Image: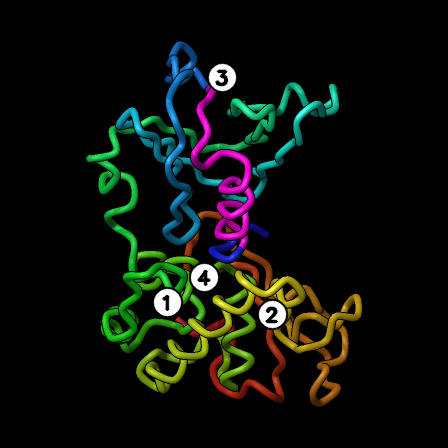
């Protein structure tokens, strides 16, 4: 699933295809920007903040995209074309003067902004471990602001720390030995923030470590609890428990945990 590390990796692929290149083809296939003419501009950066991607140009515009659950980016080399079956899924097409082309597929958020006004799209976000301006102390302060809040819900709140999605929230709870519903006030928040930052950076930057939390790359063993419902815990053998997401309740996402390795409150905690 797309999380901060996913989007960071996407940005680096787009760097290779687009940064420093002029756009000779450019289409935004969304009603709000269908007539925008971006050709002739040079792409100068692909920046990320949490799960948000900011593609900047020398013409003063920024393309803001967010993958949410189903969006993706793909890049074709010069002389190659996207399969015809994917044509209806294209929301963004950016063709460079080298012949390389980047396609944003089924992306639900596509916005064209003045670069000077990017804060309107990302200004609400908390510190991001993958950004040069990462502020661990501020992340600790924000996460600690409501000591009664369940840990997993706090980790998922992008206003507190940006870039941690459901996979990382569940895995970090396991790695720190806490039930996902443990109150934040009962947690060593600085240690948690340090682990989260190191884990996200490693996942984003090391080829063989992408969203691997166990150190094992064998299929089905890359995560401690996420996606492993009813299978034996890789540490103690207890079946991994799961509760389904409650639609419309951001505090109650699909959650996995090991009842033995993660003592504490259960999902009925309010």
Q: Is residue 201 above or below residue 158?
A: below
Element on which disc 4 rests:
loop
Name the residue at 56% across, 44% down: 13
Q: Nearer the viewer, residue 254 or 1?
A: 1
Q: Nearer the viewer, mark 4 or mark 3?
A: 3
Identify the mark at residue 256; answer none if there is no mark: 2
Q: Is residue 10 magenta?
A: yes
| Neighbours of disc 4 within 10 Å: few (<14), some (14-19), many (20+) | many
Q: Nearer the viewer, mark 1 or mark 3?
A: 3
Q: Earlier in the sequence, mark 2 or mark 3?
A: 3
| Position of residue 59 measured from the top left corner of the image (x, y, whole percent) | 29, 24
Real-space Cα separation, disc 2 to disc 4, in angstroms: 15 Å
| Residue 266 visible in this rendered orientation of the protein | yes
Element on which disc 1 rests:
helix
Q: Quadrant of residue 270?
A: bottom left
Residue named by callout 1: 154
Q: Earlier in the sequence, mark 1 or mark 4?
A: 1
Residue named by callout 3: 24
Q: Earlier in the sequence, mark 1 or mark 2?
A: 1
Residues drawn in magenta: 6-28
Q: Quadrant of residue 56?
A: top left
Q: Nearer the viewer, mark 2 or mark 3?
A: 3
Element on which disc 3 rests:
strand
């Amino acid at each position: 699933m797309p999380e901060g590390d996913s989007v960071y990796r996407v940005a680096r692929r787009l760097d290779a295809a687009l940064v420093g290149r002029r756009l000779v083809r450019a289409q935004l296939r969304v009603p709000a920007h269908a007539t925008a003419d971006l050709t002739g501009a040079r792409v100068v950066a692909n920046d990320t903040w949490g799960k948000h991607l900011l593609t900047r140009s020398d013409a003063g515009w920024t393309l803001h995209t967010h993958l949410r659950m189903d969006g993706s980016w793909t890049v074709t080399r010069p002389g190659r074309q996207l399969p015809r079956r994917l044509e209806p899924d294209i929301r963004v097409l950016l063709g460079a003067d080298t012949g390389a082309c980047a396609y944003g597929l089924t992306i639900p958020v596509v916005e064209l902004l003045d670069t000077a006004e990017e804060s309107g799209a990302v200004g609400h976000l908390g510190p991001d471990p993958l950004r040069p301006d990462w502020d661990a102390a501020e992340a600790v302060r924000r996460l600690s602001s409501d000591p009664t809040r369940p840990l997993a819900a706090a980790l998922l709140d992008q206003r507190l720390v940006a870039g941690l999605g459901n996979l990382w929230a569940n895995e970090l709870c396991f790695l720190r030995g806490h039930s996902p519903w443990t109150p934040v006030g009962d947690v060593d928040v600085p240690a948690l923030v340090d682990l989260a930052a190191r884990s996200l950076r490693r996942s984003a930057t090391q080829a063989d470590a992408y969203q691997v939390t166990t150190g094992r790359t064998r299929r089905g063993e890359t995560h401690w609890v996420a996606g492993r419902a009813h299978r034996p815990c890789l540490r103690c053998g207890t079946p991994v428990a799961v509760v389904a997401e409650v639609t419309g309740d951001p505090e109650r996402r699909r959650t996995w945990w090991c009842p033995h390795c993660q003592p504490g409150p259960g999902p009925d905690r309010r």
